[in-house]
Image (cartoon, grey):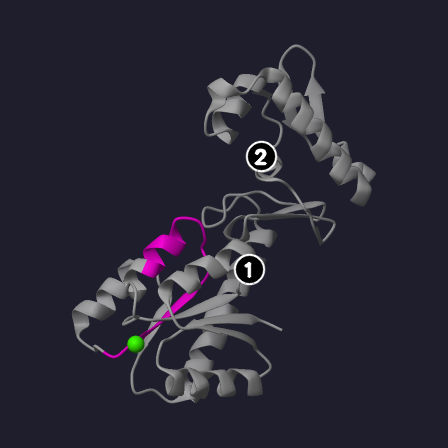
Amino acid sequence: MPSILIVEDERPIADTLIYALETENFSVTHLSTAQEGLTHFDSHTPDLAVLDIGLPDFNGFDLCRKIRTFSEVPILFLTARDSEIDQVLGLELGADDYVTKPFSPRTVVARIRAILRRGSAAHQSSAAHPGSAAHPEPSSELLHHQADRMSISCSGQPLDLTAHEYKLLAILLAQPGRVFTREQLLEQAWEDPGSAMDRTIDAHIKTLRAKLRKVSEEAAETIQTRRGLGYTLLF
Ligand code: CA
């Protein structure tokens, strides 16, 4: 059941959309302010976000910009200002589509379906052609990185990783076979590498392997130690 986040301050508009989406078996979360919408991402990753432009605290464009700093979630704008400028601006922000008010809920549902279909088609083609330009992160059945969700799954099971474990595994997974020194891993995965020590990397690799081993012994063994050098990931 795809999950949709709606950030819209006009209750009647939101209600129409919620009804149309729930009828089509979407799971819907509705919030009325941009800040609530942003905070929602602390604990949830919706499959798609529908953002109104005119919101009471800060506008939908700014909300989209903030979301884009950490998420590639598909975004559909609802706009009451149907000038070209707003529409183009909306699209340049990395939004996937927009609809102008008044709209028919049926149209919005159709647009949402189309965006989600495009997303899953791109996803499948990247799986068929690992390392393609559109999705540079190589993945396998064993370990699969969904960068937009900041999530890595092992044998189809999402891993419960700390931020540093996630970054380490994502770095290793991005370039299988490349040997990374502990210094390189610290620099790329820690905001303040100076405060951490080489042993920090070893400790995190250890917990990472343990988490992988719970799901798959084979996956745990993809992370290999190169004595005196560092770590590499090999399928
Ligand atoms: Ca509004």
Q: In which quarter of the image is residue 58?
A: bottom left
Q: Quadrant of residue 98?
A: bottom left
* Residue annotated with mark 2: 164
Q: Which residue is drawn at 72% across and 45% down?
A: 142
Up the image or down, 147 lies above or below 229; here it is below
> In the structure shown, which secondary structural element does the residue marked by tag 1 occupy?
loop
Q: Residue at x 58, y 25 (%)?
A: 178
Magenta segment: 63-80
Up the image or down, 50 lies above or below 18; here it is above
Alpha carbon distance from label 2 to label 1: 19 Å
Q: Where is residue 57 in the image (x, y as percent from the top left)?
A: 30, 65
The disc, 2 or 1, on the residue closer to the chain's N-terminal end is: 1
Q: Residue at x 55, y 48 (%)?
A: 150
Left or right side of 158 for 71: left
Residue sitting nearer the eye, 129 or 16: 16
For disc 1, the neighbor class at 10 Å (few under 14, some 14 to 19, many from 20) is few
Number of marks drawn: 2
Q: Which residue is drawn at 58% across and 71% down?
A: 2
Residue 110 part of the magenta-drawn span: no
Query: Residue type at mark 2?
Result: His
Q: Quadrant of residue 108?
A: bottom left
Task: Identify the mark at residue 44; answer none if there is no mark.
Answer: 1
